[in-house]
Amino acid sequence: MATQIQAQTQTQAAQTTLPTHFSDLVRLIDTGQTLDEAQTQTLMTGALAQVLNGIDLTRAQMRAVMLTIMRGQCGDATMGALLAGLRMKGESIEEITAAAEVMRELALPVELGDTPHVVDIVGTGGDGANLFNVSTASALVAAAAGCHVAKHGSRGVSTSSGSSDLLQKAGVRLDLPIEAVTRCIREQGLGFLFAPNHHTAMRHAAGVRRELKARTLFNILGPLTNPARVRRAVIGVFNPALCEPLAHVMHNLGAKHVMVVGSLDGLDELSIASPSQVAELKDGQVRVYHLEPEDVGLTSQPLKGLMVNGSGESLALIQAAFAPATKSIASDQANNTANNKDAIAQKAADMIALNAGAAIYVAGLADSHAEGVVRAQRVLSSGAAAQKLQAFATFTQDLARDVPAT
């Protein structure tokens, strides 16, 4: 009884530290009203106090906070303290959901209508591994296999070869209007949604993120906020503990089939060198399991040789992995598709097939991940992935020439 009374007293004490008008201000924002400077400060102070007391923000509260940040109405000191407090407490599923909803609402959208088999394959970055750009290579393979890939990405977080860096090195034009990006997805099966072009409100948090030099909520929001609002995706995370929570967030956001993955050797993608944690959202349910390369017909092997220094090295390794099998050895057998490649290029091809196979599966073009891997291997051995990269670059260059000068 004494313990119960003590707990109640602590809860009451925590509640009394909150500004009395915090909930009222949340309701005002929820009805579309704009707060003045004093009200905004009260709102953010109330949110910060609640977080520092270890109390999760409700979805409505987090929505109000995120709108305030994205409208440029939150001071840097308060924003930094709140982001740090959320990380120390641990962001809840409802908090992440609300933040992602706001970012999606404020993004410049890409409307794909009834385009079939739309999928994204994207990672949080921040794993520090300096591998070649696996997700972008996998996106090209998935597109060559028949998916429509709305590739959401930016510059490198923990590497000098982010998705945009790699594609620009390959001759892809990223300075395209939204209508042109939409055409890329519909006609080429692949379009690059450069995050800074779509999430312009993020500029209000850029300074604080640079100053903090630490992972915050924003590091995990990128893969959740594709401007095309894809309902199928493979999302890589730097910490496997994030897999299950983010799968539930994607369910809250209306996703249909998603694999959130993080390898036990620290990659923000599926690894050929270790088991990977997977949280798979399918048919409204989240299933968590470990996946080993052997589960989908591949062989575990070390990552040695797959690290790169910059987008040039990344592109060279991807092009080697994309090299078609010679006619004399081409077959449907996965182990015979690329014997003309050196060992490192073949290892890169296996890594790509593992991840592209997942995208092909969640896009609905394969009945299982293993079947998706086989389809990815056929694309790689046929040279279709290399052809897709060249065709995509040429298509974007042609579109860029048609854009009126400003």
Image: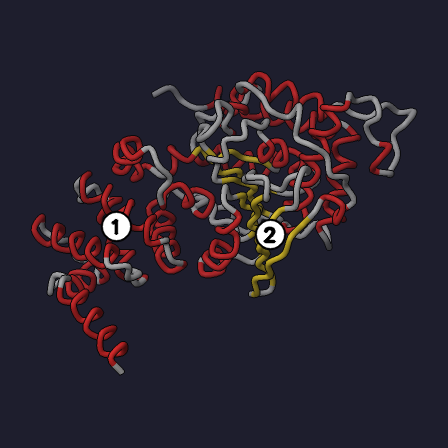
Q: Is residue 266 visible?
A: yes
> Which of the labelled discs sits on residue 377, or is there none?
none
Left or right relative to 19: residue 372: right
Name the quadrant of the C terminus: top left
Q: Farthest bottom residue?
A: 1
Residue name at image x 59 percent, y 17 percent: 313
Q: Looking at the picture, which amino acid does disc 2 mark?
A: Val
Q: Residue 145: give x, y in percent of width and height.
A: 70, 39
Q: Residue 20: give x, y in percent of width and height.
A: 11, 65
Under tag 1, what secondary structure? Answer: helix
Name the quadrant of the N terminus: bottom left
Left or right relative to 47: residue 284: right
Colour convention: secondary structure
Q: Which residue is mark 2?
A: 278
The vertical placement of 314 against 78, above or below, is above
Q: Looking at the picture, which amino acid does disc 1 mark?
A: Leu
Q: Which residue is mark 1?
A: 67
Q: Nearer the viewer, residue 340 or 292?
A: 292
Q: Farthest front residue?
A: 2
What is the CA distance from the residue labelled 1 to the residue labelled 2?
Answer: 31 Å
